[in-house]
Amino acid sequence: TLHLICLHGPCSTMATDCRCATMKGEKTATTNPKAPRNHKKMRQRLPSIVLSVCFFAHVGSALLASPTAIRSGAFPNPLAFAPSITTLKKSQLPFHHRASSIYLSSAISADETAQKVAADDTKHYNSHATTLSTHLKDASLAQLNNDVVTQQREMEYAEQVLVQWVEEYRGRNSHSSDSSDSLVEQPELPDAQLFNDVIEGLLALPSSFAIVDDENDNEKSPPNEDVENDTQEMNDEIRRQLLRKGKSREHLQSENNKSDRATHILDLMESFHEPTGSIYDTIIASHGEDVLQCLSYLSTGQDGDDELNSKESLYHQQAWKSAKSALQLLNRSEELYQETGQSSSQLPSIASYVTAMDVWKALAVVTEEDDEKKKRDEALEVVRNLRQRRLKVYTLDRDAAGENNNRGGSGGYNILPQEVATMTVEEVLDFTTNLLSESVPEYQLKIEDTSKIGTWHFNQLIFDLAKYPQSFSGSLAQDLLDYMVYMVKKSSPSKRRRRRLKQSAPHPNIPKPNAETINGVLKAWMVTPDYSDVARRAEAVLAKLAIWQSEGILWGVSADTISYNTCINCWKESGITGAAQRATDILRLMEDASTTITPDVISYTTCIGAWADCSSRDPSAGGCAEELLMRMYNRNKDAAGDESVAPRPTTRCFNAVLLAFANGRQSGSGKRAMELLRFMERLNSEGYADLSPDRYTFNIIMKALLCCGERGASQKANQLLERMEDSYSKGNSSMKPDLITYNTVLDAFSKEGDAKSAERLLEKMLNNRGDDMAKPNSHSYTAVLTAWSRSEDKAMSVRRAQALFDDIEGRYAAGETDFRAETSVYNALINCWAKSGDRTALYHVTQILSLMEELGLKGGDSDVQPNSRTYCSVLDTLANSKKHKAHAESLEILQRMEDYYSEGYDSVRPCARAYSIVLSTIARSRRKNKALEAQELLHRMESEYIGGNSACRPNVYSYNAVLNAAAFCGRDEREQEEAFKVACLTFDELRMSDYLQPSHVSYGTFLKAIKKLMQESDVRDNLVKGLFRKCCREGLASDFVLKEMADLSTPGLYQSLLEGVTNEYGNLPKSWSANV
């Protein structure tokens, strides 16, 4: 029974199909076709009693057995069996929570046990939240680095963690409800923001359908017939998975579709929270993109091409499926909007209606065959229905449509009272003025004649809401606009009443909205603080205006260029993913010849600025910004320079494009920035008077040169500085260099290690005593000290760095108190000593650290307070000092960091780098039982991370240091036994980690530990063979791994693993080392 299911490695098959070295020949069960492919998930589905029996029967017996027997091969390696110890520690089973507490101490009372369970639940909540945040952060970082594989993997992990968290909450919540113990607290639920973050991360993934095409192309490639049995066994499971996926491409699309995955997370979210309308809008937009992408793959293929027709049929089916998903989400969004009392946060945006109508229109267009007439009619009916629903949702006077509104029948206001329909114009104006006066006491709206209250007074109040931004500015301005439209619509009499009204008293002044009213509301939305959906709200104002125009309510009132510019700026400031693209779409609408709105310089500058703001996240932002600039230039050129038709590019436009290249930090951005500068100067010489480079232009180009990593960047930046100084000396005040200019050039010298040039420039800054704009600060001195630390002449560099630091202290002691050495300067000096290789380096860095602790921590001087970087530099110096008791001193310094952090000094928070350096120091020492000591420090590090210190999350280097400590332990037999156990458990913990994966160094170091700590035997050969196969599958077979394999394996084993897989030149497959 215990060997029914193989839990070793990634195979996750039944024992009859198991290809693991330790399970061959044990065919005790038939294959289960529904066996899960992921062994980790499968373990969690097993009953807790089976896990317990398997654990104690296999791993427990192995660990309790003699370590000598394990190393000699008499007893199998515990790593070969699963579930691992790490899995049981992290498992959420009742066995772990309750039975283990009773086993450890039978004297614990029932109440104390319940309290332990509640505390354990809280710990698991923190663990889930931290793990989820880590995966999302790693996915975002991978997106910035264009690492699609890592991004997809991290988002898959994040999705699994969230789903598992929800399932555990449901299970534990049900268990807690049935329990009569009042001491057991209810488990905590993932908050709404975590759901939002996962959905945004999923939608940030690349197109899933393009991935499908790549995978299908890979499946068509013929297998290599020269591969021998061993390699075929290693790739068997991967091929089986590809074949299973290849049998149903439609299933593959559904499984990998990011929109469907985001919808699934939204389904879970709806069970516990009320999603905002913006979440529905984002997923609807993603489904719309899927529809259009699938339809773009359709072509006019020949009827005889069955394969092409079959593929297009699948895309056509997927397009209909995604369109129906978008429609269902829109229906759910409307239902939630009605259920929540028409809350503004749940209002579906106009963009969602437009997206749904566009995709169904596209389906109607591509469905032209006679036998598809029903589908075409269905699509057109959906479009008509959506148009009516949009008008219904965004119509103000719902009472006229026969709806009962509990907000006075005026359309559902956000701030104005419910009885606003019965209030006069003067009362509404007084109410709004008093509300603003409560937040801004000095505010007053002067009304000389109350009988003449009209549009001007309402416009003035709306613009005052934008002038004094409040959290309610946008909502209240929107309410005033809705009220004005409501009054206009209410005052429009029917033909039957016009005769009577002519004989009655004159109608009071009706504040009818105009273009200024619309612009004021848009500006109020733009400046509203702490509102996450400002851009969509601004677009909704223009959408409402179009509806009011079509209904004849505001005939003649149209949005102008200022209105659209405000919407573009709202998107620019929103920071939402895809904001720059949406701003570009609005600009393209303004450029369209069918509209009467002409974009101006502000339109282009704001849109380009939106790309500059997102360039650190989007690698293509620089190119998109430059494309807009060239479009602007070509439009003006085609208009023969007529700026009333198409505006000319200005200096601000070029600066925004240059900033997009600088923030993008892409290779070649510095070269492209220099080319734009030459183009800018050429246009200026041709008569573009508003196109003259200024100080800001040169500063951005210097930043682009600094960040691009090209050779000679520092010399180019210095040449630009000299050009600026020369131009300023000739009378061009706009080219006067400032502190940012000089510091940027200093950073460029520092990055290349040109310390002499950096120090000469610093002396030049010091000599310009009358120029306050170029006076050196701590950043300037830090850059020069860093340049000396990177200099090749280490002996000279440390002397010059110390002399520079003494000069700073001497100036401060002499009375020049405008500048003093701060923490960054101290850190740069410590770093310079740490890299010098000087024998006295350790003495100097420890003295500097003691001085900083004395002045900054004990003396309360925050300017010289040490931080984590300070301690890491000192620990690094200690690790490289070859001092006999370096490990003891490093542990003492680490303990000081923890003590200061516990006292409230956040700047000295222990980080993963500090722990990793100490672990490496322990591994290099000759201390007895250093493997156990390193393992204890690693577990201490994990405890700190679980306790809330996210900075000390263990990384691969931490685990590798423990493996290295085990591989280089002493010669004592008992110590070697303990070291081997530590190596096995550490590698197993790394392999089963939720946020880490072994590196090629991990595999090589573990192989080295096996070679030194385990005697030759068949068990060792089988273990090494399985480990090497897994390493190759993960693409981590580096030269280090191959060297250890060659030294470790028995004669013939290593050659048998490589036989048949090398090419004619003796090279191994590239896939084996793809991730090194």
Image: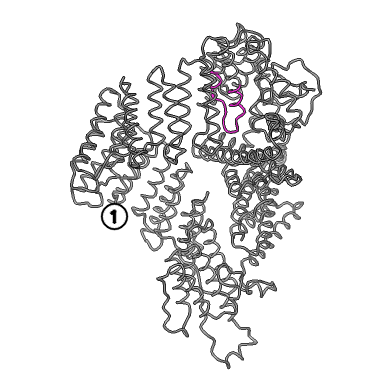
Label 1: which residue? 687
Quadrant in the picture for the N terminus = top right
**Residue 1003 is drawn in which quadrant?**
top right
Spot occupied by residue 305 in the image (x, y as percentages of width and height) = 70, 37
Q: Is residue 232 magenta?
A: no
389 and 223: which is toward the camera: 389
Q: What are the residue bounds of the magenta stretch?
A: 985-1005
1064 and 724: which is toward the camera: 724
Q: Is residue 1003 magenta?
A: yes
546 and 221: which is toward the camera: 546
| Main secondary structure of the magenta stretch | helix
Spot occupied by residue 459 in the image (x, y as percentages of width and height) = 46, 73
In the rendered image, the residue lying farthest to the bottom is 503
322 and 134: which is toward the camera: 134
Relative to 182, is 448 above or below? below
Spot occupied by residue 1069 in the image (x, y as percentages of width and height) = 57, 20
Relative to 798, is 527 above or below? below
Spot occupied by residue 310 in the image (x, y as percentages of width and height) = 72, 39
What amino acid type is highlighted by mark number 1? Gly
**Residue 436 horizontal side relative to residue 833, left or right:** right
The secondary element bearing badge 1 is classed as loop
Relative to 564, is 852 above or below? above
Q: Is residue 219 visible?
A: no
**Callout 1 environment at 10 Å: few (<14), some (14 to 19), or many (20+)?**
few
Q: Is residue 562 visible?
A: yes
